[in-house]
Image: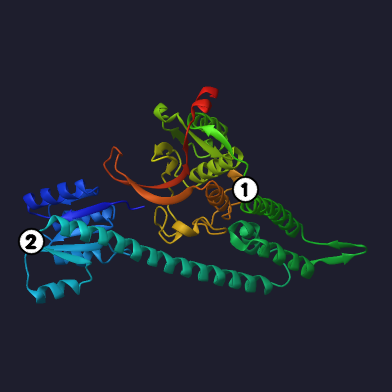
Amino acid sequence: MEGKRVLIAEDDAILGFYLKQRLTELGYKVFLAKDGEKALQAYREYPFPVVITDQEMPSLNGEDLISALKMGEVEPSIIMITGNKDPKFIVKVMKMGIFDYLIKPIQDFEIAIKLKRAFEYYEMKRTELIAKKEQQLRLEGQLEWIQWKEKMTSVGKFKRENQNLFESLKHSFCQGAGIGSLVSILKMVRDSSQVEGNFYKIESELMELIQINADMAEKSLNKFIEIDALISNEPRLESINLHSLYEEMRSWIEELNPIVKIKNHELLISDFNLNHSHHRISISKTCFKKSFVEIITNACKFSIPNSTITIIIKFENDWFKCAVYNEPTQNFDGTTGIPIEYENLIFEPFYRLSKSVYEDYGTLDYGLGLSYVDNCIKKHSGKMSIFNVKDHLDWDGKPKTKVAFQMALPTEKETANESFSG
């Protein structure tokens, strides 16, 4: 979630002050850099959706800054400020792929309109990029399944000495192969078993594989039943005071102590603003608790050991919001946080960033948990999102990437009778 963040690269102190003040008045969060190098450094630490840059600056001019900004995976919408009115120069700059330009002296109405359109253009391009990457991931997933299936069907008789295959199959259900793993194992039983009288003799390791995958199949079936019931039926809602819900959530956190202790995490929850006690929310407490526990469990699984997981409770514009922030471990490709192509896919079944199995947490580990959360929140007419944020509050001064899960549910004002009844 980028928000209305703008990076300004301007070496003229007076113009820079004017732009920052004007854009702040328009509701934007503005970072002002005094030259191109400082602007590039700020962008690399935390990319901005929109960048406004002057043409002439010391150390790194506007054109060089634009070239550097366009090397990233997601390009910002760039607006150049220039005093050069020569049409040939304007054409040259626009050919660099910038969004628009402003000619000095700058008019208030002009920058307001162009900035609004720059954000709309950025979101359009970002959505387009996410869609392309999602399509690529889906195709790769289908290809992986086909290759895995071909590999398993060509295995033939099970050989005890092939321990690599055994270990691979042992966890393949959790890692996305699903019921196909169980089918392949049963085929291997058929090929390797020996008849002794009225009984079949099979490898003990194969029997262990069958038991492991049968248990996982049962758990997955139960989870599918839960999700199907959630989608097919309307949950039974009860009206609850926001402060009462907050106290319930604190009790749920206490119940999660065994999970929190696995990697020595600390759970912190913000205080409740009593000014919001006169609002109520209609929820299925069972459904919401499962979703809350699932998000906290995910945060624990994918956070670095000994880190703090923070839960922020807010009430904004008649919405109850619960955001969970965690400091994530590195992804398999060395990146940190949620890649943009997974922001939507992560709520679909079987799509996971990590291929690891987290046996200590007692979860399925193949991407059904967040699917349940997403459907639960939608059934409550709510909204669910996951995004990266930069935490600049660390003592060493280095910003940290954190992942935020945010649930938002609509509320209603408490009537006098409800307030009296508690």
Residue 167 left/right relative to 355: right
Residue at image position (23%, 53%) is 6
**The furthest residue to the top:** 420
Q: At which x and y percent is residue 396?
A: 28, 40
- In the picture of the structure, the residue carrying the numbered disc 2 is 104
Q: Tag 2 or tag 1, which sits nearer the N-term?
A: 2
Query: Badge 1: few (under 14), some or many (20 or more) residues near its Cα, within 10 Å?
Result: few
Q: Alpha-carbon distance for marks 1 and 2?
A: 58 Å
Asked if residue 336 is positioned above or below residue 134 in the image, the reply reads above
Query: Badge 2: few (under 14), some or many (20 or more) residues near its Cα, within 10 Å?
Result: few
Q: At which x and y percent is residue 17?
A: 11, 48
Q: At which x and y percent is residue 238?
A: 59, 36
Depth check, front residue: 115 or 289: 115
Residue at image position (56%, 40%) is 283
Examine the image and state in which quarter residue 63 appears: bottom left
**The furthest residue to the right:** 197
Tell me the amino acid under the disc marked 2.
Answer: Lys
Residue 58 left/right relative to 357: left
Tell me the amino acid under the disc marked 1.
Answer: Glu
Q: At which x and y percent is residue 138?
A: 51, 68
**Number of callouts:** 2
At mark 2, the secondary structure is: loop
Depth check, front residue: 184 or 274: 274
**The furthest residue to the bottom:** 88
Residue 159 visible in the picture: no
- In the picture of the structure, the residue carrying the numbered disc 1 is 234
Residue 224 left/right relative to 25: right
